Amino acid sequence: MFPCAHIAEMIRGAYEGLITTPEKINDYIDGEDERVSSKLRKGLRIWRKLKYQLVEYNSLPAYLKDNEFILGYYRSEWPLKQIFLSIFSIHNETLNVWTHLIGFFLFLFLTIYTAMRAPMVADFNSVQHLSKMIGKADLNKIRLELLKCVSSLSNMPDLLKLNDLTTSLHSLDFHSLSGWTFVELLTNCLPEQFSLNGLKDVTMASPLIVQPITRWPFYAFLGGAMFCLLASSTCHLLACHSQRLSYIMLRIDYAGIAALIATSFYPPVYYSFMCNPFFCFLYLGFITLMGIATIIFSLLPFFQKSEFRKYRASLFFLMGFSGMAPIIHKLILHKNQPEALQTTGYEILMGVLYALGAIIYVTRIPERWMPGKFDIAGHSHQLFHVLVVAGAYTHYRDGLIYLRWRDSQGC
């Protein structure tokens, strides 16, 4: 019994020393204070190791108790340094952190990729009369004017070395970046010759083929998705530090969810009703105000309590369900448009994924069936995270269809 009591006494003494003079702990462990015996330094190392052990649910402070079916592997009130290092260790939040952190980097990549490929999104295969448009313009008559305006034509020797500029344009590959750039330059440099008014006699699949439609609704969605995923990942990593930080991070997490839901409406609403400004601004204004109201409501202290879990899920679910109105309106307005049906299919799939995630989140399946068996992997919140990323990626694919549709047909 004596060794155990002796170790306990050393740990207790080290703990008291840490409380009274916390700055000396490193000196003690590193042996810089010669007055401290080797036994006490050993006790300090044991105490520090025990302090950062994972604990069980019953040992948690009240603000960290959220899911009684996850019984162990909790971090409780760790210092920030240890918390950041724990991102590479195993505990019951590891997969919660990484599922949405990987999702954040996925959408960061998709944002950069989309921005780089933005001029290429237009579906040139659907433009049957682009060559007729070029053919009707006598570019040889405006050659000098064109060369004065478009200095970058010097980088296109295949065009300049031909006497017949029109013939060279007929052979230009408009799927390539140079083809796209040249047509765009023609429009910018010679607006009178290549304006929409000058092309009234040409049947075109899109008056906007040279200038793609605005992308801001699509990028707003991508920004909302990244904010939601990063906020969620950070919340699961840092919330165990202290009650105050937990309160702050949960508020940011709820704001991220509201931002993702609200911005998910932007591409379908804007591109479906871009030719009907009244309904476009009506739907966008409604979902934006609802998102702001949800964020404000989530700031209330009682909103984070465990007993309000189903109310939180219901609030976000109703916010998403309000999207049925613009979807039905879109189908009525564009009933003969194939893209309307394609995008609706993606939107239904996205809604199913989000709804399934919300149901799993509220019911705490599967851990409620076998408490303690899914502490590390497979519990409801991890499944919820995976379904959120899948739903957001489905919506990304949906947005690409909207871009191709409006790029190729405009209003």
Image: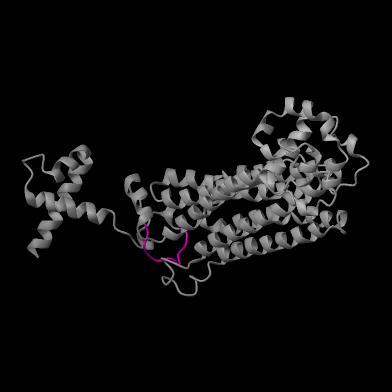
Horizontal side, residue 291 vs residue 106: left or right = right
Horizontal side, residue 242 vs residue 33: left or right = right
Query: Would you place residue 196 above or below residue 259 in this image?
Result: above
Would you identify the image quadrant in which residue 338 lies?
A: bottom right
Decide which of 308, 392 is in the foreground and name it. Answer: 392
- Colouring rule applied to residues: one colour
In percent of width and height, residue 258 lies at 62, 48
The question of residue 73 being in magenta is answered with: yes
Quarter that holds the N terminus: bottom left
The question of residue 68 being in magenta is answered with: yes
* Residue 258 visible in the picture: yes
Horizontal side, residue 376 vs residue 357: left or right = left
Residue at 71%, 61% (x, y): give it.
346
Q: Residue furthest right?
A: 201
Decide which of 308, 312 is in the foreground and name it. Answer: 312
Decide which of 305, 263 is in the foreground and name it. Answer: 263
In percent of width and height, residue 45 lies at 18, 52
* Residue 272 visible in the picture: no
In percent of width and height, residue 208 lies at 80, 42
In percent of width and height, residue 161 lies at 71, 36
Q: What is the magenta segment's predominant secondary structure?
A: loop
Magenta residues, as a range? 66-75
